[in-house]
Amino acid sequence: MIFKNARVITSKGIIETDFLVEEGKIKEIKKDIVPKDEVVDLSGYYVLPSVIDGHTHFNSRFLGAREVIPTADDYKSGSEVSLAGGITSFINFIDPAKEDPVGSAKSEIEKASAQSMTDYSFHLIVRQGEHIKYLDEIFRLGVKSVKVFMAYKGSMQLDDENIMKAMRKVKELGGVIAIHAENGDVIDELQKEYGDRDEAVYHALTRPSEVEEEAVNRVSMMAYLTKAKAYIVHVSSPNSLKIIESWRKKGAEIYGETCPHYLVFDESYYYRPDGKRFIMSPPLRSKEMRKELVDNLTRIFTLGSDYSGYMSVYKDKALSYIEVPNGVASTEFLVPTIMNLMFDGFISPEHVAEITSEDQIKLYGIKGKGFAVGSDADFAVIRREDWVVKDWHGKMDHSIYEGVKFKAKVVRTYLRGELVFEEDVKGRRKGELLKR
């Protein structure tokens, strides 16, 4: 199959070219390939290759809760959401059983293999120091990265000593460590100070940007001392990006990821009657901080959706902001958000390609992806058009994006050269475990 007249977004800019796909691989990239087989004319469209969402919680539960509160989407519906948003690979978090993290990893790989229509991989959450001793075996399964939490005291929070031990082990194994950076002890004290309240705004008041910034500085120092490859997930504060950059100048291999919702929304959503539906951690920030984050997009290394979709029944019934399951479902709107910002001049095409694909490939050590001869023919086809979000894919019964106006729309998604999304998901192609 020959794709002609494509405007491909790469780290070298927008390249107008044709490309030939055979047996799921890109075989040739050049202008004016002579048609010999089926031809798809992409005139007027943009092509974004090999979009990777490195931060999802499909088939999961609210990690900070005492009871089991499941996410709305499993690997099947989550992969449908991904394809509808032009995403061809995701990396999901495994919350391991206390005594059997290896069994947990094997189980999640099996479930994704049976259900996912996109390619997939995993990060293992290190809930306790005991999990570190299992990382050799976890890495042999193909899970090459871990995550630690500095927040959610009493459930997920790992102490500094074990974070450093995890960093040293991950460095030894040649992997990467992700960090949820918020000072859990300070948050716990602020929650005690404010007490149990119903209003969503208290979530933001008990998790001010300073608790993120302090944790980012502290864990960046640990990465510097251990020489581990590390990245901060869901950065919401522009000051955090500046802190990361300062440690990088010292020699730390530390990177920053942000999420679409921090680039689109602000804390005014917590004053709405349905404000509890938009609680996530870190919380949405002020209008000024949101704008400054957008203005600092050049400091962002990767973009991840942090999919943590919970049905409204779980959000609305919580008697306190503390009990609300944290998260929103941004996966389907990751590509439209960043393309919107490109069309508005806030980010270059080169950086769009880097934070959605090329730098993700480098960070996670992914093989066989990208836009090059020999790579899998994975790509989203995007049309520039004005549209308003009225519905969405997956099982979620609400969306923070409802009513948002976009000027970029994913109209088709291809996985290894096969059309897998056009208005709706096509077929039931099985995804594969990413090679890392």
Image (cartoon, grey):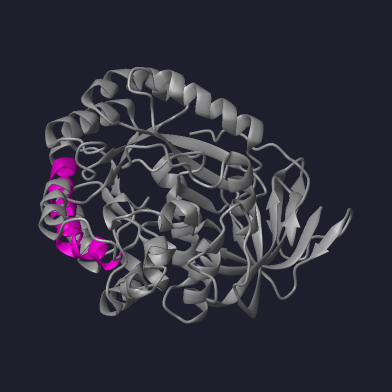
| 24 relative to 278, above or below | above
Please indicate whether residue 3 sits to the left or right of residue 54 in the image.
right
| Residue sitting at x 32%, y 26% | 173
| Residue sitting at x 22%, y 25% | 129
Please indicate whether residue 62 sits to the left or right of residue 12 in the image.
left
Quarter assignment of residue 148: top left
The percent coordinates of residue 426 (x first, y second) are 77, 50
The reply to whether residue 422 is in sight is: no
Residue 213 part of the magenta-drawn span: yes
Range of magenta residues: 200-224
Quarter assignment of residue 39: bottom right
Please indicate whether residue 51 sits to the left or right of residue 17 in the image.
left
The percent coordinates of residue 204 (x first, y second) are 24, 64
| Residue sitting at x 33%, y 70% | 270
Please indicate whether residue 414 sits to the left or right of residue 230 in the image.
right
The percent coordinates of residue 402 (x first, y second) are 54, 71
Dominant secondary structure (helix, strand or loop) of the stretch shown in magenta: helix
| Residue sitting at x 58%, y 47% | 78
Between 195 and 90, the residue placed more toward the observer is 195
Between 263 and 413, the residue placed more toward the observer is 263
What count of labels does the image hold? 0
| 201 relative to 360, above or below | below
Residue 132 part of the magenta-drawn span: no
The percent coordinates of residue 36 (x first, y second) are 89, 55
Between 62 and 257, the residue placed more toward the observer is 62
The reply to whether residue 84 is in sight is: yes
Quarter assignment of residue 2: bottom right
